[in-house]
Image (cartoon, helix red, strand yellow):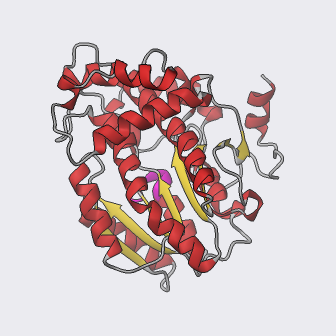
Amino acid sequence: MIETVKHLIGSGGPSGFGSRSTAEHVTAKSDLRSLTAIITGATSGIGAETARVLAKRGARLVIPARSLKTAEETKSRILSEFPDAEIIVMHLDLSSLASVRRFVDDFESLHLPLNILINNAGKYAQKHAISEDGVEMTFATNYLGHFLLTKLLLNKMIETAEQTGVQGRIVNVTSVIHSWFSGDMLIYVADISRSNRNYDATRAYALSKLANVLHTIELSRILHKMDANVTANCVHPGIVRTRLTRDRDGLITDLVFFLTSKLLKSVPQAAATTCYVATSPRLRNVCGKYFSDCNEARTSKSGSCNLKAQRLWTASELLVSPASTPNVYQTFNFSLISDAVYV
């Protein structure tokens, strides 16, 4: 109840910022002119505002998108406001592991540094669908594509941090909805990747957001073990009506948003936590944490489980392996991962 009241009145937490802070507000003192950032999902909603504000602060932006036309339109809008901004548009379909690999190859051919990676893109699939790699589409887009993207770009980020002395930042955009998922993650995603019999759109989305949280936990452990000058944290942007809900427009959705309107954030407010975690000097060496309203917060019990994080990481390595086939869910027994990790 206390946290809800704080959210409603927008009171600042230890960071000095709160639910009513905007992305421009939290980055007011930031000078990002020497930094390069990749932002997925930057063509609309929270991602677009994140990109706009980082461009305003001087960062070079790489905007990957499935639709180059839409990405070019985003670029034009930003340039109309900030003519000196440097923005590179590239193709990326996060639901395709082959597309992720091509994007990374193309990015590396530019010989640019990489200081900030914001894994922001999100999909809510009302209808059941399977990716070209044989994975349920929400999980493939929201989590697995970002897992591979981060894995392939990590050496570039570590190298950039070593050469510049500027700590790299990885930000995974998740949601408080991660707490809605219960059950065995891998068994469920395997089930809905085989058929639509037990598919539930909200549960699948919650699963993907829990995976984002657990990815952050295990990635932070690995970064610490490597002694890398790169941090990884995850953020809940808040409740905001964006294009993410476009598949659920209707009377019920409209009613829910009306009833919760006092809890809704504007897009500039929703982008604040991402921008804060990606840029704030206060968060130097802060790693493996979950942020909401620009302050550290608690995840669900499952979202703080190191063993679940290790198990998911092991399965993810298998799924993104070039040797994997689209029918991996038909042939692999995920309970073996559970046994290997929990022994």
Q: Is residue 4 above or below residue 9?
A: above
- Quadrant of the rendered image containing residue 153: bottom left
Q: Indicate the position of residue 211 as horizontal and vertical percent values.
A: 46, 34
Tell me if 5 is positioned left or right of 47 in this view.
right
Question: Does residue 187 appear in the picture of this structure?
Answer: yes
Q: Nearer the viewer, residue 224 or 57?
A: 224
Tell me if 99 is positioned left or right of 268 in this view.
left
**Which residue is located at x 28 percent, y 23 percent?**
190
Q: Is residue 44 magenta?
A: yes
Q: Indicate the position of residue 246 as horizontal and vertical percent values.
A: 35, 38
**Which residue is located at x 37 percent, y 55 percent?**
149
Q: Nearer the viewer, residue 279 or 152?
A: 152
Question: Does residue 258 appear in the picture of this structure?
Answer: no
Q: Which residues are magenta?
A: 42-47
- Quadrant of the rendered image containing residue 87: bottom left
| Quarter that holds the N terminus | top right
Q: Indicate the position of residue 121 as horizontal and vertical percent values.
A: 41, 49
Tell me if 124 is positioned left or right of 4 in this view.
left
**Which residue is located at x 62 percent, y 64 percent?**
229
Q: Is residue 131 magenta?
A: no
Q: Nearer the viewer, residue 226 or 13?
A: 226
Q: Indicate the position of residue 200 as horizontal and vertical percent values.
A: 33, 19
**Which residue is located at x 63 percent, y 45 percent?**
288
Q: Is residue 67 above or below residue 165?
A: above
Count every numbered label the image shows and give the total. 0
